[in-house]
Amino acid sequence: METAIEGDIESTRQVAVRALPLPPKPRNLRVRKKPVRREAEDSSQRLRLALQAAFLALNVWIGLQFYFWVRWAESGGRTMSVSRPAGVEGWLPIEGLMQFKYVLASGQLPRLHPAAFFLFLAFALISLFFRKAFCGWICPVGTFSEYLWNFGRIVFGRNFHIPPWIDLPLRSLKYLLLGFFAYAVTTMSAAAIADFVESPYGLVVDVRMLNLFRFVGTTTAYIVGGLILASVLVQNFWCRYLCPYGALMGLISIFSPARITRNESACIDCAKCANACPSALPVDRLVQIRSAECMSCLECVAVCPAKDALALRFVASAKLHRVVPAWQLAAGIAVVFFGLVGYAKLSDHWQTHLPQEVFLKLVPAANEQHHPMIRDKIEENRE
Ligand code: SF4
Ligand code: SF4
């Protein structure tokens, strides 16, 4: 039985191991063990792909409804009338962070764009309970990114690896972006946040974001095209190097009790887990994965051939480990997400209640003020 001192030694060893770049395990030092094959078929990836597809479909639905609502407002209420889907506020991560700060500072739920707060809270709690499972299981950008690198594998037969000396500084980019946004938000008072959200700009900030993609300028086209190409070639390019939201979820996930754990006595050192990891983590050389980059995608667990060698576990203490099967992870994500969205809807803290006339005035006016090219397009829509 492991003593407290042995537990401390193990934790210290792991901290030291994580701090250093890990050299590959020399082949001649690998002990050949008799493999005990896993019997049950792993269904985690089928479940994950299904949940990803469901959330992608939900986002496409929200996107279409939002587009038709914007068209309705731009036409002066003459096209088909649809309601504004509050779920679009999930696409406003900075506003979600602002609303979170507002709630902490004022002790009140926001009146306008409250869904941004509830969605941010849901994603943060999912990261706290299940590591960065938001990125690996439900984020539509993460899902699209995964489709792209899988497409790259089909076309080129593989994905390309960025050398570690470029990979490491590139990974820090997303933390720099996060630091910039976090500084801007945390230095705002609750009153300043409320002023921004209630301003003509803040009320239709979602429309401005949509227009960025509706009326693509040359610069935006080059940037989006470059990101798509990079995502085809390199696994999770956007998530790994540039997404500040994923960086925030990763930092929250450091406090999560859930982590991939490797049982060294059952492991046969085949390294299949490390080769499968889309975050390029050295799963085969660590006992626990505590990295902020782990998305709880379970790809490593799915490919592991050895019985009981690798699993996602809740680690409460050195002795108290509990395996979290894929279905419990999926159910946990769904309970947190739909629980908070359901609470917000039932308590009437989901929709932004403003007279339709406000949006009929603000949506076209905001566009005209800032985008001369868009103004022409809106005039075409009106005609
Ligand atoms: S360590 Fe496993 S669960 Fe974490 S990102 Fe890598 S493959 Fe996914
Ligand atoms: S996949 Fe990883 S954890 Fe599983 S046996 Fe191979 S090296 Fe060990």
Image (cartoon, helix red, strand yellow):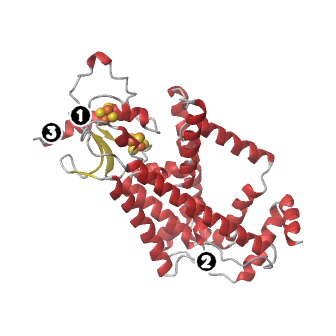
Could you tell me which secondary element the residue under label 3 belongs to? helix
Examine the rendering and report whether any part of residue 296 can be seen.
no
Q: Would you say 234 lies left or right of 125 here? A: right
Q: Is mark 2 on a helix, strand or loop?
A: loop
- Please tell me which residue is depicted at 57% across the width and 51% down the height of the picture: 141
First of labels 1, 2 by sequence position: 1
For ligand 2, which image quadrant applies? top left
Residue to which mark 3 is pinned: 5
Q: Where is residue 143 in the image (x, y as percent from the top left)?
A: 54, 50
Does any portion of residue 272 appear in the rendered image?
yes
Q: Looking at the figure, which quarter contains the N terminus? A: top left
For the residues labelled 1 and 2, the Cα–Cα distance comes to: 53 Å
Report whether the residue tagged 2 is closer than 8 Å to ligand 1.
no
Give the amino acid type for the residue marked by disc 1 in the picture: Glu
Q: Distance between the residues labelled 1 and 3?
A: 19 Å
Q: Picture quarter containing residue 284?
A: top left
The type of residue carrying mark 3 is Ile
Q: At numbered mark 1, what does the secondary structure look like: helix, strand or loop?
A: loop
Q: Mark 2 points at which residue?
A: 352
Q: In which quarter of the image is residue 336?
A: bottom left
Which label belongs to residue 264?
1
Q: Position of residue 200 (x, y in %)?
A: 73, 72
Q: Nearer the viewer, mark 1 or mark 3?
A: 1
Task: Quarter of the image for the C terminus: give it.
Answer: bottom right
Residue 355 percent across, percent down from the top left: 69, 84
